[in-house]
Image (cartoon, grey):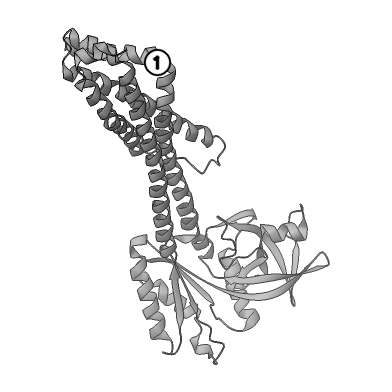
Amino acid sequence: MIELRETLSVAIDALRANKLRTMLTSLGVIIGSASIVLVVTVALTSKKFVISQIEAIGSNLVQVEMVQRPDRAQPLSYEMTLEDMEAVKSIPGVVEVAGTRELPMTVIAQGVERPVNLVGVTEGYQSIRHLVILRGRYFDAADMETRSKVCLITRQLAEKMFGTESPVGRPFRMGELTFTVIGVFRERVDTYGLSDIQENSVIIPFSLMKYYTGFEVVRLLSAQAASAEEMPLVERQIAQLLRSRHPAEAEYKVQTLTAILSAARNISLALTILLILVAFIALLISGIGIMNIMLVTVKERTREIGIRKAIGAARKEIMYQFLFESFVISGGGAIVGILIGLAVPVIAQLFLPNNLRVPISTWSVVVAFVVSCSTGLFFGYLPANQAAKLQPIESLRYE
């Protein structure tokens, strides 16, 4: 123990005597270890954000629409109906079902005519699509049953047509009917036009749409599964149900967001692995730098090594001394790099939205420290072994 303590003391004194060199040598380790922590943190944050955005649209959502064939006539029997929607509700694992139908219309408000996308919605649509009511209210049961001439409009359309004034309670003329605006809404997350809700959408009760057009056709049927595990079964059962209720020639496209979620996870994993490899390359370069500096150090301290051997220092003590110096350089750099890698997300959190949390991976900290220290010991072994092999007489003659 005394010999080991003496060896460690000599190693620390040697590092203190060359502070600038030690700091510059550990700089590569600092960058590499900080990169590992930051890369994993950024990857986890981006993965969490992307998946939360997709799940907010409806990760357990199954959407069905009839495949349109412009080259042949498609009878009304091919179309999905409210009866189909009720039948889907009876499928095990389905917790909510909603149907929509769209019509292009023009609206007149304050003497200005604009094109809008009129969407008739059934009960359950708000809970499935996670609509956020910004002003006013959503449809109630009475609105659905009595075919009330009420509507909700998007935030963008409200700003275009009413400016800063509240549109709630204002008249809204579409075609031959005049509606009353009862609310302003938005989707919980932006879908960038990839859903049935557009910037100029106006939603009305489906019962009113049915009365207005004379058809109870459902263009898009949405079913929410109880969990992601039940999605494949629910998807298959809905497809089988529609085939059994309609002619064999009718085609329906059943789609979910499961594939998109899986793709997002795979892309995030691939990017994480790629960036971690880049961080490992930085550590590899820093390890080579440590080896080069230690080789130069051995050369410069040849006479010192000869004196230590002459007064009785064993070969293993010389090796341990230089290995410990390499460990201190790499381990100290790892600790500083990890602290930087942890401080950056903490500071960045202050400038991010409150609903986006930056997760810190414990494994990234452990891996960064272990890999950095291992790199220092691995690349420090050759200089340490070279120092241990020096002959005392030849070392003492070295000038």
Identify the residue at the far right of this view.
111
Residue appearing at x 40%, y 53% in the figure:
270
- Residue 343 placed where, x, y %? 47, 30
Circle 1 sits in a helix, a strand or a loop, which is it?
loop
For label 1, the residue is 18
Quadrant in the picture for residue 133 = bottom right
- Residue 10 placed where, x, y %? 28, 12
Whether residue 198 is situated above or below residue 382 in the rendered picture: below
- Residue 114 placed where, x, y %? 76, 69
In this orientation, which residue lies closer to the viewer: 147 or 91? 91
Residue appearing at x 49%, y 89% in the figure:
77
Tag 1: residue type? Answer: Asn
- Residue 202 placed where, x, y %? 66, 67
In the drawing, does residue 312 fall left or right of residue 252?
A: left
- Quadrant where the N terminus sits is top left
Q: Within 10 Å of the Cα at label 1, are there few (<14), some (14-19), or many (20+) other Cα atoms?
A: few
Q: Does residue 27 appear anywhere in the picture?
A: yes
Residue appearing at x 31%, y 15% in the figure:
301
Quadrant in the picture for residue 284 = top left
